[in-house]
Image (cartoon, grey):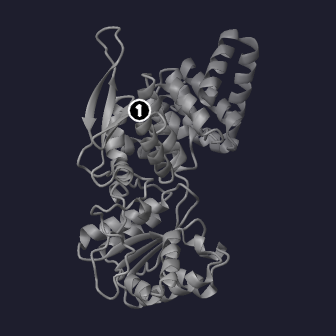
């Protein structure tokens, strides 16, 4: 029985691994142990209640379809949950819970491929060629990627505003097509989904389809193989809002580009909305036909930049709020300070931190957060700003930033301000003038004097030197 359970679960893992990112697989699936298979029910052991709830909320759709593929249409899954016995020193005990009847609603990295279809009824495949007959189409939009969960900041305000305008009047604005570009992990796919979801909310009768360029190309190749390219083109001409993600992957695919060119023209001429994403602006995409690139420039080209510190903190707070999880503010701020260039990595580090705390029964604190950041994002460059330095110094001395930057001549406040200036010169590339402006509106001469004063005190005052070393460690933390 145990061998059967292991074989079934190993086969499931092969499928699951192909459908989620590597870090999610390591965090949420490697710790699972198969227990038994009985009456077409696979029982798996999970380490905690939190673990069980996370799987149910994020991966239940993938799990159910994978189990049915292995055990047939009647195959089911149940959990054996390890419960810590807090009343005495006895070993943990287990409770058995069946799967829920809900679908995964917060899953950013699972896309159920055609290979997971079973003989049971499934959601209609958006790529089934319907000919000229309009059918109900699964738009492939992820509910979690809504505008409510897309935090606005200076880094994305233009693109987000254009997306909202499109959602209110798709195909009728000057933003057609909307071409969104950014580096990996900055939210272009999230924004594309958000536009589609908002259109669906505002216009339930409109047909919206999100498709990756790889999916588009694979379906076109299949239509060529089956000699039904006309049906393929007719299908896409039924779409009211077409969202194509990662268009740069069509580089060098001349036939696919040609068919997309004609679909683009037909939709645009009929005032249907197109939203396209890429990792670079049209002018930098090589291997795409000039006539297609020129059409990408017809509407609005908007980029997404790495989020600033406040936006990164807001992203983490929103994610935690949506998941019903609390985390100390200093840990949230540490993650936001440490991971500066990629939202996906930022959220991944947060999830890993939660998982480690749950699996190992550890408190979520700065020490644990530091371990996660060092192991999970080894090459992330931490942003040390003047604002951050001021915050560390003011908290160390029990002052507010306003107090520290005030005009008072109290010795403890003056010394804190001098230290903030000193560390700003040591750890940032800001000019003395910039440092002075942010540290109480002082001039560059005052900053230079403060730095010299701090250096002299380090050499002559042992206690002061200890303050400086402790603060330096906190700033680099």
Observer-nearest residue: 153 or 132? 132
Is residue 125 at all visible to an observer of this figure? yes
Observer-nearest residue: 135 or 314? 135
Secondary structure under the numbered disc 1 in the rendered image: helix
Dividing the image into 4 quarters, which one contains the N terminus?
A: top left
Observer-nearest residue: 6 or 135? 6
Vertical placement of residue 336 versus 393, above or below: below
Is residue 407 at all visible to an observer of this figure? no
Dividing the image into 4 quarters, which one contains the C terminus?
A: top right
Q: How many marks do you count on the picture?
A: 1
x, y (%) of residue 143?
A: 33, 58
x, y (%) of residue 379?
A: 66, 41
Relative to 102, is 223 on the left or the right? right
Vertical placement of residue 16 versus 328, above or below: below
Residue at the location (25% across, 74% down)?
203
Vertical placement of residue 451 versus 269, above or below: above
x, y (%) of residue 222?
A: 49, 78
x, y (%) of residue 87?
A: 28, 10
Residue at the location (66% across, 31% down)?
423
Counting other residues with Cα less than 10 Å from the Cα at mark 1, is it few (<14), some (14-19), or many (20 or more)? Answer: few
Q: Which residue is mark 1?
A: 2
Answer with the quarter of the image where residue 360 lies. Answer: top left
Residue at the location (64% across, 38% down)?
378
Observer-nearest residue: 375 or 405? 375
Relative to 439, is 431 on the left or the right? right
Answer with the quarter of the image where residue 194 lies. Answer: bottom left
């Amino acid at each position: 029985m145990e061998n059967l359970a292991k074989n079934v679960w190993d086969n499931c893992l092969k499928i699951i691994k192909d459908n989620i990112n590597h870090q999610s697989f390591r965090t949420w699936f490697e710790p699972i142990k198969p227990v038994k298979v009985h009456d077409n029910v696979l029982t798996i052991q999970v380490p905690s209640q939190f673990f069980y709830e996370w799987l149910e909320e994020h991966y239940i759709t993938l799990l159910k379809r994978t189990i049915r593929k292995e055990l047939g249409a009647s195959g089911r899954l149940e959990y054996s949950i390890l419960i810590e016995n807090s009343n005495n020193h006895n070993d943990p005990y287990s409770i058995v819970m069946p799967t829920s009847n809900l679908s995964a609603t917060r899953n950013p990295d699972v896309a159920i491929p055609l290979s997971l279809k079973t003989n049971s009824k499934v959601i209609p495949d958006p790529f089934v060629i319907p000919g000229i007959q309009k059918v109900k189409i699964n738009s492939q939009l992820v509910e979690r990627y809504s505008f409510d969960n897309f935090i606005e900041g200076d880094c994305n305000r233009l693109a987000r505003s254009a997306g909202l305008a499109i959602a209110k009047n798709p195909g009728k604005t000057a933003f057609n097509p909307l071409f969104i570009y950014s580096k990996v992990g900055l939210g272009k796919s999230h924004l594309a989904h958000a536009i589609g979801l908002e259109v669906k909310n505002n216009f339930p009768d409109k047909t919206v389809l999100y498709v990756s360029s790889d999916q588009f190309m694979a379906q076109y190749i299949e239509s060529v193989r089956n000699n039904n390219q006309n049906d393929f083109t007719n299908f896409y001409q039924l779409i009211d809002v077409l969202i194509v993600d990662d268009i740069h992957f069509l580089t060098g695919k001349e036939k696919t580009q040609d068919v997309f060119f004609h679909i683009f023209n037909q939709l645009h001429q009929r005032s249907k909305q197109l939203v396209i994403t890429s990792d670079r602006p049209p002018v930098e995409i090589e291997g795409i036909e000039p006539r297609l690139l020129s059409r990408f420039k017809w509407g609005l080209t908007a980029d997404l930049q790495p989020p600033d510190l406040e936006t990164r903190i807001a992203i983490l707070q929103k994610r935690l709020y949506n998941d019903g999880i609390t985390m100390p503010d200093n840990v949230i701020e540490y993650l936001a300070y440490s991971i500066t260039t990629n939202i996906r990595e930022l959220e991944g580090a947060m999830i890993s931190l939660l998982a480690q705390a749950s699996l190992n029964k550890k408190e979520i604190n700065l020490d644990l957060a530091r371990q996660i950041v060092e192991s999970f994002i080894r090459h992330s460059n931490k942003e040390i700003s003047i604002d951050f330095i001021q915050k560390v110094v003011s908290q160390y001395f029990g002052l507010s930033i306003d107090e520290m930057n005030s005009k008072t001549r109290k010795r403890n406040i003056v010394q804190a301000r001098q230290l903030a200036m000193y560390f700003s010169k040591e750890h940032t590339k800001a000019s003395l003038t910039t440092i002075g402006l942010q540290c109480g509106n002082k001039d560059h001469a005052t900053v230079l004097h403060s730095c010299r004063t701090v250096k002299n005190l380090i050499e002559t005052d042992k206690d002061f030197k200890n303050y400086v070393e402790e603060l330096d460690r906190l700033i680099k933390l």
